[in-house]
Amino acid sequence: MAPALNIVAVTSCTTGIAQTYMAADVLERCARTKGYAIKVETQGALGIINPITPIDLRCADVVILTDDMAIDDVARFAGMTVVTVTIDDILSAPHEIIDRLTGSQK
Amino acid sequence: MKNKHTFEYRFPLPNGLHARPASAIMERVKPLGCKVQITNLSNQKTASASSVLSMISCDIAMGDQCLIAIEGESENLAIAEQQLLQFLNGDFHNCDDAVVELPASDDKKPLPYMLQCEPMHSFRGVSVSPGVGAGKVMHLGEPVLMLSVESVEHGSIEAESQCFAQVREQLLAAMKLEAQQSSGEQQAIVRAHLALLEDPELVSHLKQGLLAGLSVLGAVLATQHHYEQLIAGASNHYLRERVLDIRDICSRLIVTAYGPQSFQTVEQNLSEDTVCIANHLAPSQFLALDRACLKGLVLESGGSTSHTVILARSFGIPVLVGVDQARQHIPAGERCILDADNRLLIADPSSAVCRYYQLEQDKLARLSKRRQRYLNDKAQTADGLNIEVAANIASAEEALSAFANGAEGIGLFRTEMLYMDRAEAPDEEEQLAIYRQALECGGDRPVIIRTMDIGGDKPVDYFRIGAEENPFLGYRAVRIYPEYLDHFKTQLRAIFRAAVHGQCKIMVPMVATVAEARWLREISNQVIAELAEQQIDHNPKVPLGMMLEVPSCAFIIDQLVRYVDFFSIGSNDLTQYFLAADRGNDRVDYLYDSLNPSFLRLLKHIVDEVHKAGSWVGMCGEFAGDPDHMPLLVGLQLDEISLGAPRIPEVKEAISTLNADACKALLVEAISQETADDVRALLARHRQASANDLAILTPETILVDADCRNKAEVIKTLIDNLLVNDRLIDVQGAETAIWEREGISPTMLGFGIAIPHCKSDSIAANTISIMKLKEPVLWNEGDEMLTDTVFMLTVRASDAGNTHMKIFAQLARRIMRDEFRTTLATCRGQQELMAYISQELEL
C-alpha cells in the first residue's frame, strides 16, 4: 500500500555543521512514525547529501524547506505545495509541522 | 515682599554634582540676590546653592530628580528664576566633561564577552607590559604630612584664628591669580577649588574648630576629616572621589601656614598584593618596590619605551600607561584589577568580574603547567634542530628571573639604564660589579652586554646631546662614542674586567659602516692593551659583536666580519629604518610590520650572508618574542633569538612543535607573498596543517562536573579548554564566532542540551567539546529552559566535506535521538562518555 503522504524536504542552517543534520534526522523519524514517506536533502558543510531527484519530485505530495539560509535550486519545486519553516521550528515542534502538511496538501 | 518659587529639575551631568558643576551653580546664584535651595528628591537631602560642599553632600547623580526652590523679593523673583532656568538648561550642560571612561567602541579589540556583559567602573589606558594583576591600590609619590597636631606650635584662640584668617587670605589671593593665569580644564579645576575655599560651610566648620581651641593644623585636619566622612557616604563613585578636592584645599592651607616642608614624598613598603599608581616612576623607584607584592603598575603619564616599563616587562609585571588622573579616580586602599591585556583598570570589581579573572587565572595556570618542562629543556625543533632562546634584560637583577624562566643565555643586556636618572655616569667599579653580577648568574651560559645606547630619544643630562628633530636618525649610540670616548672606554674596561667571571660578549648598537666597526675594534684593542699594561685582571678574548639594525649593514656583512665576531638583529629599529615608517606615528604605523615580505627577504639575506661568512647571528627585538613567528625564525636558521623572559617557555614550546625543513620551505613561500597579511594567512594555514593530526574528540575535550554559573562562563571555559589543548589559533576570534552564532538564535535544543558551534578561521583543530555541568544554567535570555549538557562544535572555516564534517553531522543526528540522550545522561566519568560517544560515532 502506498504511503498516505510522500514528503520531500531540504534543510540548511547558518553554519551548516549541526542543525542541518539534526533537523533532517528529526523530520525523517517523525514522518516515518506517522507512516509517511520522506526524503530529506541536507545542504550543509558536507555539501548536498541525499539529493532529491526528479523522480522523487514527481512522487512528492508536499515539500518542506527551511528558510534559515538560501536553498540551492528552489526552482525545481515550482508549482508544488511548499511549506517553509525555520530550523528551530523543526527542532522544537516536528510533529506539528508534519501534521500541518496533511492540511496543506491538496 | 518675599516670595518663593519651586520647580523640578532632572540632573543632567554624567559625573553627578561634584565640586566643579556645584561651583558653577554657586557663581550663577550669587548675583541673583535670591536664596536658592536644592533638594535631591531621590534621598530628600537638601542643600543651599551658596555652599558647594552642601551641594556635594546631597549626592546628586545623573538623572536624579531635584526640587529647586528660589526665594527672594517678588519683583526680582521671576527674572531670577528665568535666568537660573536658562543657565541650568543651557551652559550648565557644558561645565563638566563627559564620563571619564572611554567608550569600548573606541578600542580596536573588543572586550572579552564576559566583561562586556558586566557593568564596571573602569578606565582604559595604553598597555605597555602584558598580564593581569589584582590587589589594593597604592598611590606612589603621594606627599605625606610630616606634621602632627602635637608637634606644631599652638597659640591662643585669638592668635590661631588670626593666623588662619591670614593664611586663608593669602591662599585665596594666590589661587585667584592662578585662575587668571590658567585656562581651560586647569582653570575650571582651580575655580572649583577656589569655590571650596570660599564655601561658607567649610569656613564656618574651620572657625568652629579654632574657637574650640584647635591649632590651625588641628582645625584644618578636623574639617578635612569631617567632609571626607560626609562625602565617603555618597552613592555616586565619582562624588566619593571628590574627597580629593577637599584634601587638596586642606593641604594647601597647611602648606601656606607651615611651609612646603609640611609634606614629603616617602617611599612606601608593599606588604600585600598591590597595584601601584603613580604619575611616573623612575627605574630606581621601581626596583625599590617589593616585586613579590607588586601585581601591577599604572602610570598616568609615560610612554612604552621608558626604562621603568622595560624593567616591568621583563619582570612580567603588567603596566598600563596614560590613565589620566588615575589617582584621582581610584582612591588608595581600594581593590582593583589591572588587566593590561585588555587595557583595563577596574576599580572595585564586582564578583562576576572577579569570576572572569578567576577563570583566566585557571587557564594561565594550566598553560604554564603544560609548559613547565621548558623551564629546563633547551629549545629544539621536533626534528632536532637547536636554536638558542635567550632573554633580554635591562638590569643585573633581572638575570636571575630570566634564567629561572628558562633562558639559555642573555641575548641582550641593555646598559643605558645604568646611565639614566642620575647626575653623572656610573664609574668603572660600579659597572664592574653590575656586569659581574649578571655574568656570575649566567655561569657557563652566554651573556651579551650591549654598550650604552644613549641619544636624542633617551636623553641623559651629562651627555649634552640635546633634543633633535629626528632622534632615531640622529646622534645616538655608537655615533656619540668618539665624543664621549672616556665614557665608552670606561664601559669597555668594566666589561673586559667582569668577563673573567662568566661567558661574556660585547655588542655595540647602531653600527652603520665598516669604518665604525674598524674603529670599535681599534678602541677595544687599545682598552685591552691598557688593562694588560696596568696588570689589571681581565679577559681579552671577549667576542665583540654589533647590532644589525641599520639596513646598510645588510650589504657589507662580508666586510664587517673582518672586525666583528657576531651579529644580533635589532628587529624593531631595523623594521622602521627599512620601511621608513616611524612606529610611534599612528598614521604610518601600518607600514611598520615585520611580517612584510620585503623585510623577511632582508632577514633571509642577512642570515645567509652571515652564515656564508662563517659568523653567528641572533635576533633581539619584538619580532623574536612572538610564538606565532617561530616557523619563520626557525626557517631563517637564526643561531639565537632573545626575548622578554616571561614568554620563553611559550616560545620554546612553539619551537618544539616545528619541523626545521618544513620551516625553511615555509620561509621561501613567505617571501614570495605580496603582503604582510598574506604572510599572516600563510602562518595560520601552517598552524592549522600541524593541528590536522589531532583527534576530533579526546578525553581532554570532555569536561565533567564543570562548575560554571552561566552561559558566558560555559562558553569561556570550553574555549579556554581548547586553547589549553592547543586547538585554537585565536581565543578571542573563536569566542566571538560562537557568540555571533548564538546571536542569530540561541543553540538551546531542549532536553537540557545546548549545542553552541562555529565555523571560524580562529580554529586550529576541528573539535567536539562536551561539558556536563554540576548545576544547570539558563541558556536563553527570556525563557526558563535549563541546560546541563553542552556539545560545542568548533570547525575550521577552510574545511568542507571532509571526514570531520561527517562526524559532526553524525553527532548532530544522534543528539536528536532519545536513546542516545538517555545513555549520555547515565554516563558519569570522562572515560565512560568518551567510550560511549566513540562507539556511537565509530571514531
Image: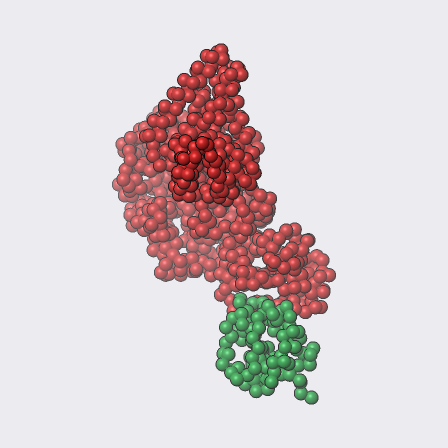
Chain colours: A green, B red
> Depth check: B411 or A101 in front?
A101
- Residue situated furthest front in the rendering: B1
Question: Quick check: B186 left or right of B828?
Answer: left
> Depth check: B193 or B597 in front?
B193
Question: Quick check: B817 left or right of B64?
Answer: right
Residue A26: x, y in percent?
A: 64, 72
Q: Is residue B421 visible?
A: yes
Q: Is residue B410 above or below residue B250?
A: below
Image quadrant containing the C terminus of chain B: bottom right
Residue at position x 48%, y 18% in the image: B216
Residue at position x 34%, y 40% in the image: B509
Q: Is residue B311 above or below residue B153?
A: below
Image quadrant containing the N terminus of chain B: top left
- Residue situated furthest top in the rendering: B156
* Number of numbered discs: 0
> Depth check: B206 or B26 in front?
B26
Residue B805: x, y in percent?
A: 56, 68
Residue at position x 56%, y 63% in the image: B745
Residue at position x 36%, y 41% in the image: B545
Residue A34: x, y in percent?
A: 69, 79
Rendering quarter of residue A30: bottom right
Question: Quick check: B510 left or right of B737?
Answer: left
- Residue situated furthest right in the rendering: B826
Residue B255: x, y in percent?
A: 43, 21
Q: Is residue B839 above or below residue B117?
A: below
Q: Is residue B297 visible?
A: no
